[in-house]
Each structure stands twice: as structure tokens, then as C-alpha cells.
Image (tube, rainbow, N blue to C red):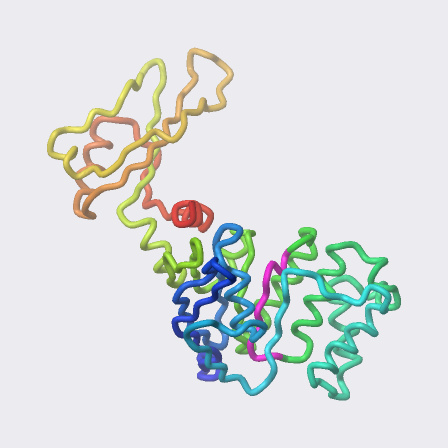
Amino acid sequence: MPETKQKLLLEAKNISKTYTDHKAVSDFNLNVLGGQIYTILGQNGAGKSSVLRMLAGIFLPDEGSINLQVSKKIGYLPEERGLYQNMKVYDHLEYLIKLKGFRHSSLKARIVEALQVVGLEDWQDKQLKQLSKGMQQKVQFLATILHEPELVILDEPFSGLDPVSLKSICQIIMDLKDKGVGIIISAHQMGILEEICDHYIFLKRGETVWKGDKEELKDHFGRNSYRFQVMSSPQHPFEALIWPANLQSKILSFAELHLTNSDKEQTSTIKKVHDFEITVSESEAVSEIFEFLFSKYKVKKFEHYLPSLNEAFQTLTT
């Protein structure tokens, strides 16, 4: 990866924020590199928006420090919509981008091209109040990134977007990443975040409960967990898995996830698929378990289980 994409853009050290008697954020730390996408995750009220506002300079932290090392202005998309409803779409974008100091001769062409990318080219002369919530969200997103910021902070950027618009916005975000822009996102669309983000920070009641990159996330939550399927039929019935004594001490948890019938016409030949999840205390036990299962049962599948981001979210924040 080019060196420019690894530039340190922002360094937050032990920042905290308190509102009256409520401590919204406690000792938050984050280093943001160019060309990387970070997501801050947590339930409603976990402190995500407070963190983003401090990183964007909207709020000052009560404790700790934030060191910005960007040569250009940052781009900040707030969760709340802040658009002048009586202005026309093009005029509004031109006004906000010039307000952020971008006055290049290519401004008009940039706005027109961006509107085409997100499907708003036919709406550029319409007043913002004539646009739907999702269309207004796209306008606000464009106003966040068209002045070529080095650091982009997005609070719920996917709100109100249809699948086609969502795809175009995600592509723009990935293009920014490829150009070396550092990006921080807070959102609840776990499938999208799992696909596009490089680093994850989980908040619970204002405190960081876990942080790491994508591989560390998978390793942390998928370590020594496996899923397998066992087939049964009237000719080969299955009642229960009985583990031998030498394996029982190595099994931390074991559960049947669900039972399904395979698609067969004759009832007498219906086969059942039993799905199980097992977590073992040590990786060396896997080969023993593997050999035992295949010697006693009709095993259809056996695989290392890597949980989804949504499952990690449920585990860490609830």
C-alpha cells in the first residue's frame, strides 16, 4: 500500500465527555490512518455520536486530547439533517462546498458528475423540500465529501437509502478509501459495515469494550468454535450425540442449532439434517472430535465457524 495511505490523520487520546451528571464517553482512544475505514458500534445511547462530534471538532472533550494532522478540512455528516429546504439542490451544494473553502474551477463539473452518480441529475434545480428523505440524505452526503477532505466522519450515512442508492454511496466511500482518505462511520447496517470496514470499535455505556481490525474480530469471536451437520434417516436414525469421556473435558459448549428435513417426495426416505455448534478449550481437540464424529455418524459438513459482525455486536453490547 502506498505510504500516503498510511498517513496518521487523527489521534484521540483518552477523550471523555460528560453532560450534566451523565458521562457519555469515557477514555476513548483512536488513531486514524489514511486509506482505512473505521466503524464505531454500539446500541442507542452508547456514546457514538458524542465521539464523532468530538473527533469532528463540534464538541471539545472534557478530558484527553485530539490531534488532527490533516492539511485540508475534514468532512462531517451529522445524524441530523441540516439542509436549507428552500434552496435548490445544485445551489445548496455549491454554497456549502464554497463555504468549506473549495473554489476550484472544476466545482460545477464535480457537482454535476456527483449528482449523476447518485441518481439526482434530474433534481438539481428542485428545492430540497421537494426531495424525499433518502434523496436529501444523498445531497447531504455529497456536501460532506465534494470539497476533497482528507478525513471523513459519517454519522448514520445510510439512513433512508434504497438498495440502489446504498450501493452507489458505498462505492463512493470505497473510492475515497482508495484515494487515501481516512473514514470513520457510525451506523447500524451490520452487513454493509462488515463488508467495507477495516477496523471496529464497540462502545457500551460510553466505554470501549472491544476494538480491533477485521481479522482480529474474526479470531476473537471465532476462536475454537466449529459448526457441523449430521444426517439421519429411518434407515440410520439419530437420537443424540454422546461424547466419550476423553472429549467431554475439552468441550466448553455444545448445542443443536436447528433440525430440518431434506426435500424428498417419499416420507419413508426423508432425511433429517441436524446442525450443531461446538466450542472447544484447545485447538488440538478438534482433530479428535473430527475423527470421533466421522467414525460414529453420517457427517455432512464440519467447518471452523467465524461469526458475523451482527453476532459480535450482540455479544459485546447487550
Report the front residue among 204 and 70. 204
Residue at (40% x, 22% y) in the render: 272
Farthest-out residue, left: 246
Residue 249 position within the rendered picture, expressed as x and y whole percent measured from the top left: 14, 36
Q: Is 130 situated above or below 27?
A: above
Q: Is 312 situated above or below 10?
A: above
The N terminus appears in which quarter of the rendering? Answer: bottom left
The C terminus appears in which quarter of the rendering? Answer: top left
Relative placement, left or right, of 70 versus 205 is right
Residue at (34% x, 21% y) in the render: 232
Residue at (33% x, 28% y) in the render: 230
Q: Is 122 situated above or below 32?
A: above
Range of the magenta residues?
149-158
Report the front residue among 250 and 151. 151
Q: Quadrant of residue 83?
A: bottom right
Report the front residue among 63 and 147. 63
Residue at (49% x, 77% y) in the render: 34
Relative placement, left or right, of 158 versus 183 is right
- Count of numbered labels shown in the rendering: 0
Residue 146 position within the rendered picture, expressed as x and y whole percent measured from the top left: 69, 76
Relative placement, left or right, of 235 versus 76 is left
Residue 15 position within the rendered picture, expressed as x and y whole percent measured from the top left: 43, 70
Q: Is 88 situated above or below 310?
A: below
Residue 106 position within the rendered picture, expressed as x and y whole percent measured from the top left: 75, 84
In the image, is residue 157 part of the stretch drawn in magenta? yes
Relative placement, left or right, of 242 versus 196 is left
Farthest-out residue, top: 268
In the image, is residue 177 part of the stretch drawn in magenta? no
